[in-house]
Image: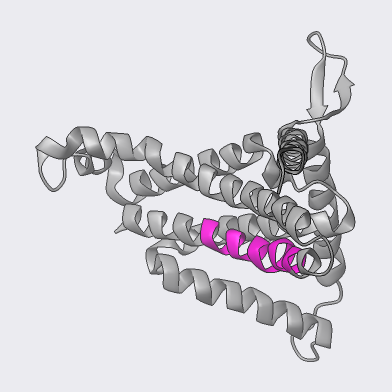
C-alpha cells in the first residue's frame, strides 16, 4: 500500500467521522416547531409536540378501551385491557411493596409514555427521549415523588432523620444521593437512547447492507422497551426504599 492509498483511506475515514459528528449534533439539536407569542416568544420544541401527540393517542385509547365495560359479560377487548392492567399492578406491587401501591398509577403512566416515546421513531418521529430536557424532567418528577413518598411514610421529622442513618457521619453522602439519583435516571435513559444512534451509524459505515436493519429492529423495539422497564423499575425500588 503506497502513500496515496493511505492518504485516501485516511481522508475517507475523516469524512465518515465528520458525517457521524454532524448526525450526532443534529440528533442533539432541539428543533423549534413554532413559537407562542407570549412573554417575548416561547419556543415549542419538537420533543414537546411529539409528547403532545403521544398524550393525545393515549387519551383516545383510554376513551375507546373503557367504553361499554361489563361485569357479567366482558368483551375480549375488556379482558385484554384488564389483564394488562392486572399485570402492571402485580409487577409494581412486587417491586415497591404494599406501602407503595398509591404510586402504581404514576409508574404505569411513565412506563407507557417512555415505551411509546422510544418506539415512535418507527413511525418517522424523533423520539422525545433523545432530548435531555425530557429525560431530565422525567427524572426530576420521579425524584420529587420519591422524596414525597418518604415524607408521607415517615413524617417530616423521620424523613430528615433518615439522612443521618445509620450514623450521622454519612449525612453529606445521603444528601448528595438525593441529587445523584435523578442524574443517574436521566443520564441512563438519555445515554442509552443516544448510544443506540451512534452504534447504528457506525454499523452503516462498516456493513451498509443487511446488518444495520437487524440491529435497527433491536434498538428501536427491544432496547426501547428495556429502557422504559429499567427507568420505572429503578424508580419503584427508590420508592420502596423511601417508604420502608
Q: For residue 37: magenta?
A: no
User: What residue sits 19% from the left and 40% below the top?
Assistant: 161
Q: Is residue 227 magenta?
A: yes
Q: Looking at the image, which residue sits at the far top?
A: 40
Quadrant of the rendering where the C terminus is positioned: bottom left
> Where 30 falls versus 217 (above or below)?
above
Q: Residue at x 60, y 45 (%)?
A: 190
Say if residue 160 shows up in the picture: no
> In the image, residue 152 lies at what x, y percent?
37, 47
Would residue 175 appear left or right of 146 to someone viewing this image?
left
Percent position of residue 8, x then y? 78, 40
Q: Is residue 48 visible?
A: yes
131 above or below 197? above
The magenta stretch is: 215-231
Using the rendered view, name the quadrant where residue 157 is placed. Answer: top left
| Residue 135 location (% of width, % of height) | 61, 42
Amino acid at each position: 500500500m503506497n502513500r496515496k492509498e493511505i492518504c485516501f483511506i485516511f481522508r475517507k475515514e475523516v469524512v465518515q467521522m465528520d458525517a457521524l459528528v454532524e448526525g450526532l449534533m443534529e440528533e442533539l439539536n432541539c428543533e423549534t416547531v413554532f413559537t407562542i407569542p407570549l412573554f417575548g416568544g416561547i419556543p415549542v420544541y419538537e420533543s414537546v409536540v411529539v409528547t403532545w401527540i403521544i398524550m393525545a393517542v393515549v387519551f383516545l385509547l383510554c376513551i375507546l378501551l373503557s367504553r361499554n365495560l361489563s361485569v357479567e359479560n366482558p368483551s375480549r377487548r375488556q379482558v385484554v385491557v384488564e389483564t394488562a392492567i392486572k399485570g402492571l399492578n402485580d409487577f409494581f406491587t412486587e417491586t415497591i411493596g404494599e406501602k407503595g401501591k398509591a404510586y402504581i398509577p404514576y409508574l404505569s403512566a411513565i412506563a407507557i409514555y417512555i415505551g411509546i416515546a422510544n418506539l415512535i421513531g418507527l413511525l418517522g418521529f424523533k423520539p422525545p427521549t433523545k432530548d435531555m430536557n425530557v429525560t431530565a424532567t422525567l427524572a426530576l418528577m420521579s425524584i420529587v415523588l420519591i422524596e414525597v413518598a418518604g415524607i408521607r411514610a415517615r413524617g417530616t421529622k423521620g424523613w430528615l432523620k433518615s439522612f443521618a442513618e445509620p450514623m450521622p457521619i454519612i449525612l453529606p453522602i445521603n444528601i448528595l444521593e438525593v441529587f445523584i439519583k435523578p442524574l443517574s435516571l436521566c443520564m441512563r435513559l438519555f445515554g442509552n437512547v443516544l448510544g443506540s444512534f451512534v452504534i447504528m451509524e457506525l454499523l452503516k459505515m462498516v456493513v451498509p447492507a443487511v446488518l444495520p436493519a437487524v440491529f435497527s429492529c433491536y434498538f428501536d423495539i427491544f432496547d426501547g422497551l428495556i429502557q422504559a422497564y429499567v427507568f420505572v423499575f429503578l424508580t419503584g425500588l427508590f420508592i420502596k426504599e423511601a417508604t420502608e
